[in-house]
Amino acid sequence: MTSILNNVLNAMQQVIIEPVEGSLNLFKLVGGSCLWATELLPLSASQKVFSIDDNTPFLQDFLIDAQLIWNGSEDNRVRSGFWTEVVANNKELHLEAIAIKQDDQSLLIISNQTEDFTLRQSTMQSARELSLYNDHLIEQNEYLHTRILAIFNKPYEQENIITALTKAIENAGFAVLITKSDLTTIIANTAALHLFEQGGSSTHESSNPVDIIVQLLKNQLPEYERIIATKSSWDGELCWMSPPSTLKWLKVALYPVLDDLNEIKNWIIFANDISNIKYLVQRNEKSDLQDLLTQLPNRISFWQRLEKQIISNIPFYLLYVDVNDFRRHNEFYGHDEGDKLLIEVSGRIKSSIKTSDFIARVGGDEFAIILTDIDNQACCEGVVERILDCTREPFQTSELESFNVNLSIGAANFPHDAHSVEELMKFVDLSAYNGKRSKANSLQFYSQSMKDASRLIIEVEHELREAIKNDEFELFLQPIIDLELNKIVKAEALIRWNHPTKGMLFPDSFIAIAEKSGLIITIGKWVIDTACQMVDKINKMGHKVKISLNLSPAQVFDENLFPHLHTCIKNNKIDPCLLELEITEGVMIDDYAITEKLLNKVRAIGVSVSIDDFGTGYSSLAYLKKLPLDFLKIDRSFVRDIVSDDNDKAIVRAVIAMAHNLNLGVIAEGVETQEQLDFLEQNSCNSVQGYFFSKPIEFSSFIMLLQNQKKKDFESHSS
Ligand SMILES: [Mg+2]
């Protein structure tokens, strides 16, 4: 048996065994090596020829039929039908076997049908329930139908017909409503009142069926206005959150009754409760609600559950669990190990909460948990402690390398912290995110200060949108001096926000929010465009100075970045060699493949690339060697103590030497004193940038600086 065939058998969940000639209960394994087969036939794992033991009574039973086939003289086969065998650890296997005799060869094929079996069971159950429900609907329709027929078959007076029709409508099993042209009710049958009956004490909403349906139509049907205005009929499904806690699905039909002048006289509305059908269909679509990797409910399923939980109005805690540094883990050990970790983490968390709690995988490395039956923060902390405890035990890779995992957990309470799904999710996400900064295990409850912070974020986000519309950004330039030429050869473009009330704002007060909200893409495009215009202006004045732009991670992963950059270069007719892009170390580690592709493309058209803030993040020298780069910028934190701190001295020397070995130019950031400059010059640093020369300045001031430099150059040449 080749390994390919073996793989095929494993994929099909089958094993093939062969009876040993002349023996009643001795077999050989021919193909297939699934774990379940070893559980079913434990002796096959250690013995080439094995017997089938008493632990599999159904299989033994089938072997009697099989022997009849194998001992016969003709080609033949017999199927076992489905049976269930209980193997070690009380695990149930749902199996089917076929005994075959063909060309004098006897074989037994056993298939594991557990997956199909479960699906079939649930489908059959759904089918039974749907059929029952359908019978009920047919019964109702037949009743109305026979009643109406009876009315028309009797010689009634006109008045009597109306009475009889009214009676038939009244007794219909579904909601029938007749309204005036302005949708005020004339008739509502008992079924309608019953369907829209409101339990509980919350009666602030209208309980008039027509009002409710019209409201639902307005909210859920974008074409509502058009249907009314054009006097059209409509039928479809509407979803009603019936107070206080039920979600009903309605099948609604709306028909206009027109008069001779083609004006609306009445509307007739039918409504049926189809919640059961919806529920059954949804249950059959369960796989759409499950995360295939961890087998936990997925994001959609979680959202639905959270909505229901909120509607039920019973207090609960919501946890948001984030695996710290998961992306780096994935990058370091490979994606298979990443998947393995997620399965293990989800399993451990699941085992530490109650079965009545609800856990789902809501993102790559994010899980959300609804903790019910908990009414105070201390209890919630207890659960979180259990979750953290079970993940403290080291994890292992397939190669048996141990490693630890830390979790950031955000917690919020319903109804104390928020009342809606969106708000709750936003708050726990924010809490987990806040905790993440510490890198260790953390639990953050949603708090007032966080509430204020999130309000501020929403505010800033709104103002940023306005700022984009109103062109409130400015690009400042900080000169970069080449130490060999002793002149400005480059400038780093740094964004400022000229806020209408708060004045000039630095990027650290808004870039993080722009990144989180995705606005960074639009702002980044503006920066590229503006920088290209600046390069053009500077060039036209006779200076050859490069402008260097900072790219945020989101921009690096935005597939429109390169086309936009290319278009701006072409539109402004500038030399691409006068542009440089700065990316941080984290970006290249987060997605090496995308980063490499982008950098290759930009360098192919002549734009240079530098690694920004070098030394502050995850420095991977391997990436530094592999990626297409031109410059390395030493972070200001190393330059700051370069004169007094021997460690920093050693680091900076080593970084410069290493960069030069990799053919990279070195730029030192944050140079503020003559002593720092001297040290960098002595150690062959190529360029410097910092307050010692100039802070970031407006475009016009930068031009003046260049003019002065030119004048000095001219004077020194002529003297
Ligand atoms: Mg920078």
Image: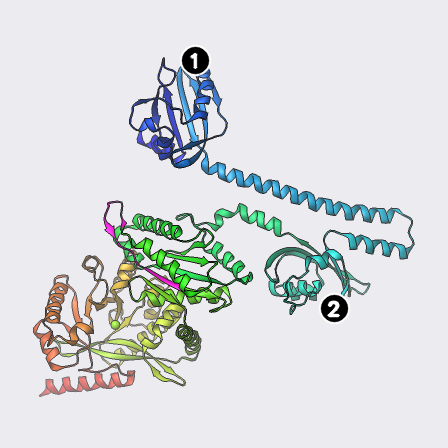
Protein image colouring: rainbow
Question: Which residue position holds label 2?
Answer: 182
Q: Is residue 533 visible?
A: no
**Horizontal and vertical percent for residue 517?**
40, 69
**Horizontal and vertical percent for residue 36?**
38, 34
Amino acid found under the numbered disc labelled 1: Asn
Front label number (1 vs 2)? 1
Q: Which residues are magenta?
A: 395-410
Residue at 26%, 66% (x, y): give it.
584
Q: Residue furthest left?
A: 682
Q: Secondary structure at mark 1?
A: helix
* Crowdedness near tag 2: few (<14), some (14–19) or many (≥20) residues, C-alpha within 10 Å: few
Q: Is residue 364 above or below residue 638?
A: above
Instruction: Check the picture and name the quadrant holding the C terminus.
Output: bottom left
Compared across the picture, whether 117 is left or right of 128 comes to: left
Instruction: Check the picture and name the quadrant holding the N terminus.
Output: top left
Q: Which mark is residue 71?
A: 1
Residue at 76%, 66% (x, y): give it.
181
Q: Residue 700 colored magenta?
A: no
Q: Is residue 31 above or below residue 699?
A: above
Q: Are marks 1 and 2 in contact (CB under 8 Å)?
A: no
Amino acid found under the numbered disc labelled 2: Asp
Q: Is residue 12 above or below residue 604?
A: above
Q: Is residue 3 visible?
A: yes
Mark 1–mark 2 distance (CA, rounded to whole Å): 84 Å
Q: Residue 406 colored magenta?
A: yes
Residue at 32%, 55% (x, y): give it.
389
Compared across the picture, whether 648 is left or right of 401 comes to: left
